[in-house]
Image (cartoon, rainbow, N blue to C red):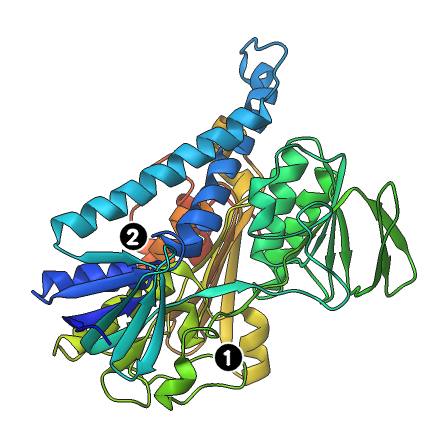
Amino acid sequence: MSEANLFDIIILGAGPAGYVAAIRAAQLKKKVCIIEKHEVGGTCLNKGCIPTKSLIASANLFNFLKKASEFGINAENINFNFSAIQERKKRIVDGGINGIKSLFKKNNITLEYGTGVFKEPFLIENHKKNGYTEILKGDKIIISIGSCPANIRGAQIDNEYIFDSDSILNIESLPDSLTIIGGGAVGCEFAYIFNSFGVKVNIVEQLSHLIPLEDEDISATLEREFKKKGIKVHTNKKVEKIFKDNTNLKITLSDNNEIKSDKLLIAIGRRFNTSGFGIENLRINTGEKGNILVNDKMESSVAGIYAAGDAAGKAMLAYVASKEGIVAAENASGIEKKMDYSLIPSTIFTEPEVGCVGLKENDANEKGIKINTGSFQFRSLGRAHASGEISGMVKVISDANTDKVLGVHIIGAHASEIIHEGVVAIKMGMKSKELEDTMHSHPVYSEGLMEGAADIHRRAIHKYRD
């Protein structure tokens, strides 16, 4: 065995958990090596958050231009070039990759490509694509090896007819029709993208409504807007059979209805990506599905070995992964820090957008928590009419006894940005009256949040109540 290269911290995986952990550890003057099997940025930059938002930006602009005449603008023969849209997406992703590599260089972080395999708890063999194997030893280890798309029984991903959420991003031409299995955030974003570019879209969700993790009033609004766009929504349905013939796919649902479709996208979530890295050589505690069990310091059952991101099996979101990476890096560097999952916002970049945080009304009712709710429609906002985006609403939930804001749920233009005012309100323990009394500029969409808070006490100015 060749002599090992020594580091203070070795990180497996350069996704949003790993690369952020590497930079934070380097800021704390640690000698850091990060090993990446594919490309820096992980799923978020290469196959998730960033490329999908690039496509959504193109879809948003195309949809807006089609409405130009409503704004007194003459724009004829509006069309799109899907290849150019895909090329723009690639440029954005490449720019992000180069940006991370630049940060690594400036922070003196060693980046090694290859597959890192544990031989011992703190000894890693990095198997490079050129056949060379190097030995790395770290005083501390952070495992951030991510996740991959989940599949369903009876569906073979062939990237020709049947795709997952990774491979669909590289599709070269648009199909006439697409069926999406899974009505969560990922499935709904892809439904919006493809529908915007003229594809006939069916979306199948086995639960009672789309985006089932969100408040039902928000879900109902999204379903209504999807149907207006011509997206066919099938809720409370399971896929029983997938059959491929010479011309298309036939998807049989649990109600015996059959959907004929050119392509199929499976978007039912993700599974942990912890096999093939020698995790079994660590004698580390893992969950039933393979995730690495950690405490609130992101430390595993083996002292000095941490896990962050999807591999830790908590909330599988890029921004949660980054926060976990920072917590892991600081604890690995001797700074005590605990991870807090109590307030995680969710954002969905459909049209209209969705932004939610905190307690949902149904959850409060099930738990016996006494609440008050206020709501406000975007169509009552001057800015919404001026901008031509009137669909949506704000819903604010407060504690019936203390008036503290417990939840904020928004669907409408810029919801992904406005929601963070709700995050701060809940984090700082604000009362709905304090949110109501906070002066907002005019005309802005966030006035809807102020009015929603006022509606809790029936004081919303631009909402009439009997």
Residue 92 position in % (x across, y down): 39, 36
Residue 14 position in % (x across, y down): 32, 59
On the rendered image, what quadrant is the C terminus found in? bottom right
Q: Bin the neighbour count of mark 2 within 10 Å (Cα to Cα): few under 14, some 14-19, many 20 and up.
A: few
In the image, residue 53 sits, relative to residue 280, either above or below, namely above
Q: Is residue 401 left or right of residue 371?
A: left
In the image, residue 157 sits, relative to residue 199, either above or below, namely below
Give the SS element for disc 2: loop
Residue bearing mark 2: 438
Foreground pick, 285 / 278: 278
Image mark for residue 370: 1
Residue at 52% of width from left, 63% of height from top?
148
Identify residue type, mark 2: Thr
Foreground pick, 205 / 24: 24
Image mark for residue 120: none
Q: Is residue 21 left or right of residue 54?
A: left
Q: Bin the neighbour count of mark 1 within 10 Å (Cα to Cα): few under 14, some 14-19, many 20 and up.
A: few
Identify residue type, mark 1: Lys
Residue at 32% of width from left, 63% of height from top?
17
Foreground pick, 12 / 234: 12
Foreground pick, 454 / 381: 381
Q: Is residue 416 left or right of residue 169?
A: left
Q: Is residue 458 left or right of residue 106?
A: right
Q: CA separation, marks 2 and 1?
A: 25 Å
Residue 435 position in % (x across, y down): 34, 57
In the image, residue 418 sits, relative to residue 198, either above or below, namely below
Give the SS element for disc 1: loop
